Amino acid sequence: MDLTGLSSKGRLLLVFCVSIFLYTSTDAEGSCKLKAKFNLRGYKEVLKRTVVVGGMFPVHQRLVDTDANTTIPPESSDCEGFNFRAFRWTQTMLFALNEINDRPDLLPRTELGYVIYDSCFTISKAVEGTLTFLTGQDEAVPNYRCGDGPPLSALVGAGGSDLSIATARILGLYYFPQMSYCSSCSVLESRFQYPTFLRTIPSDEHQSVAMAKLVLHFGWTWVGTIAAEDDYGKYGIKRFKEVVEEAGVCISFSETLPKISNPEAMERIAQTVLDSTAKIIVVFSSDVDLKPLLDELLRNNITNRTWIASEAWVTSAAISRHPDILPVLGGTIGFAVKQAEIPGLKEHLLGVSPYNDTLTEEFWGIVFNCTLSYRQVMRGMKRCTGEEMIETLNNTYSDVSQLRITYNVYKAVYAVAYALHNLETCVPGSGPFENGTCADINKFEPWQLMYYLKNLQFTVPHTGEHIFFNDGDVDGFYEILNWQSDSDGEITYSHIGYYNSSAPADDRLIINNASIIWNNDVLETPRSVCSERCQPGTRMGIRQGEPVCCFDCIPCADGEITNTTDARGCLQCDEDYWSNANHDECVPKTIEFLDFSEPLGITLIAIAAFGALAAIVVVIIFLMHLNTPLVKANDPLLSFSLLLGLVITFLSSIVFLGEPQKWSCMTSQVALAVGFALVLSSLMGKSSLLMLRARAVKAVKSATRAAKAAAAAAEQSPDTEVIAPAIPQKNDVDPIHPRHQRAMMIVGTLIQAVGCTVWLILMPPHPIKNTAAQNIKIILECDIGNIIFICSIFAYDILLALLAFAFAFVARKLEDHFNEGKSMTFGMMVFFIVWISFVPAYLSTRGKFMVAVQIFAILASSFGLLACVFIPKCYVLLVKPERNTVEMMIPRVKSRDAGVSLATNSSSANGTTVSTVSLDG
């Protein structure tokens, strides 16, 4: 049979049907047969009482192990492990009922009786007690109320959440009220499943959130959790995990405390705690379930941990008074429900008698180590006198310093009493039921009392606390306690704050951090993280396969920053900014350009000025010797245009310095291009004439050889007529004139000037901020505008240079005392070497040094041309003036060429040297 489709309530109904079937097995005569009899212990007083209030408390901690033998009739198990704390709760209910019965203002015409059972902290005993209570006799008869005794009002109990869930399902079927004092599980909030369940303890929904806020308050991101294997632990820790994980906290481990003794499980949990790096451990458990683990923690000496306690064990003397517990649990922080002083309770606790009931008798025998049983006396045990003094004891039962759950029991009993009082004092005609009727206190139905409980508001005696139920629950208010040691080395519960669920969100958790003493008497807040926080300048790098709290701190890349801790990613700096050394701030990039005032700029300016000054000096020298043969040779005007071009190139290099401006970008490139065009076209005009002279000399040499050959033939054959070859004339030697050379210079320069003008009009160079070349700098430089234009402009200069070099190279063998062709050849070679070397040097540098390399190439090539072309002439003009003669300027052939030379005619009309050819001998 498949029961998966049934609801929990449906399954419970089915269980009851089965139990009824087992109980009422009908034979031929229709007789009934009782299938079982429960073994329950507790307190009962119903005679001559008006109303009976039920109670259920876990006076014992577990059931006695029984033989599973089915060959004999089964018996209801007995209980063991006396719980002094729960026994105090039981006595508190008796005290409250006696106090109410003695009050003239509360239920003046009603005497409250009671039926209280021991649940033994197990679901089975709780169910047994519930069924027996509803039946009204010791034998439980499901669905029947046997006898005609006083009506049942409500059940106060049944202890832990698991027990209350089981009893609430049964009681809910009959709409019978249940008032719990310590069942805080959040699942009990459901009015659909538990319609008659109310409680005087806050729901664990509030406690779980409060624990989560505590963890977040101290910045703990790596915690372990331990929960009891019941609904209290399961739902409490589940809600805690949901809240903290949503906030980014990671769970290092999550363990469960078994309900049945399991030493292997305790060893495993203790080892997990020891191996984990989490220093914060949240425990949602009762003191009964936690105690076995505590023994294992002590055995392994697991210290240096901070424990977060739920209300079920934070004030438990069974835990805090455990021997040698301080090193392990010292510094524990926990949440406790409200406490109060209850006048007269201590006297009641001290005044119990061992002769009234079996539970008190057992308690007496345990605390005084004696017995009232004659059989046990016969076995050698000490006999109790009944006169022993409980006040001499120092145990949980008589300790009224932390009345918290005890106070909840007190409030639960009074809640039932005030509801009954309101029911009793109802005025007929103004009642809440049909036609304004009221319920009869002597024979009311449970659902009628449930109405008064749901709408109840009252003030607790002695404390003044105002109680009301919000759909069966009360507001979540907790004290936050810190386990500290006193002068005797005992644990005390120090108040360090509180949590109030009804306060504004920002004011719900209040903690005085300065008053906390952590484990091992440390004052500094412990850290519990899987990975240390990532400082500004780094980002979190998640480790694969590990929780998100376990990460590596990865430094931000250059140009990226983080200015917060635990940043998920780095932020890119703006274009004009760059990350500082710590990568935690974007700082303005360094503005870089080759400034006039820096040493390198000053040096280049000095060199450029020196070069320009040197060219001007040469001009002056040439002007001083303008009418000398050396200056007049090969058109002096071209020499002056060449020097002017060099002055322009020297000075244009200075314009490259300083912060680029629109005018400087245009001026520097254009001046350089036009200056070199002027220089190279002047050299081309000069070298073209020298090339033609070299060709003329070559022709003369050829003619001379032919004449010599003809003369030799005539001498050998006198009778033979030999025709001598014609000797070239002067017009064949200098086919171009100075005007042609000047035209070449002017045209060559104008072409470049026109090209530069078009460039400046269409796409002129302009200053830009180069942020891509170097990350940490903004390089102020000139954008050439269009690559086609710049390539065309300087390709033209290269063309002029190649032509000038070719002409000069051909004229390099022209022999005279002053070989100008050879000087030009060397000058052009220097020019090419400089600019060929410039390309890789320029491409391998960045920033202002690119400008420096470019200026260096300009200066080096200009100095090369100035030195190679003009220093030899200046040397003759200034040092060897005797060589500055017409004869020295005449090209000549080598000695093996029979003295062929080119004579110059200085009497030409325009004063320019004109070469002629003469033949010696």
Image: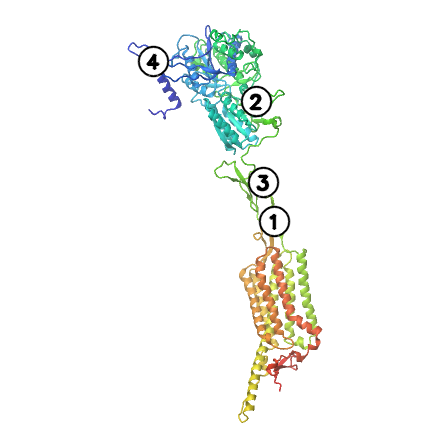
State if disc 3 and disc 2 touch (CB < 8 Å).
no
Judging depth in this view, the residue of 498 and 671 nearest the camera is: 498
Given the image, on which type of amino acid does mark 4 rest? Thr
Say which of marks 4 and 1 sits in front. Answer: 4
Q: Quadrant of the N terminus?
A: top left
Residue 723: quadrant of the picture: bottom right
Q: CA distance from mark 1 to mark 2?
A: 63 Å
Q: Describe the element under mark 1 as helix, strand or loop.
A: loop
Residue 740 visible from this viewpoint:
no
Q: CA distance from mark 4 to mark 2?
A: 56 Å
Say which of marks 4 and 2 sits in front. Answer: 2
The disc placed on residue 24 is 4
Q: CA distance from mark 3 to mark 4?
A: 76 Å
Residue appearing at x 48%, y 29% in the figure: 254
Residue placed furthest toward the front = 380
Read off the residue under disc 2.
324
Given the image, on which type of amino acid does mark 2 rest? Asp
Q: Describe the element under mark 3 as helix, strand or loop.
A: loop
Q: Quadrant of the C terminus?
A: bottom right
**Numbered circles on residues, count:** 4
Read off the residue under disc 3.
536
Residue 308 visible from this viewpoint:
yes
Residue appearing at x 68%, y 68% in the figure: 616
Say which of marks 1 and 2 sits in front. Answer: 2
Q: Residues within 10 Å of mark 2 (few under 14, many from 20)?
A: few
Q: Residues within 10 Å of mark 4 (few under 14, many from 20)?
A: some
Q: Earlier in the sequence, mark 4 or mark 2?
A: 4
Residue 266 coordinates in the image, percent (x, y): 48, 25
Up the image or down, 840 lies above or below 282; here it is: below
Read off the residue under disc 1.
589
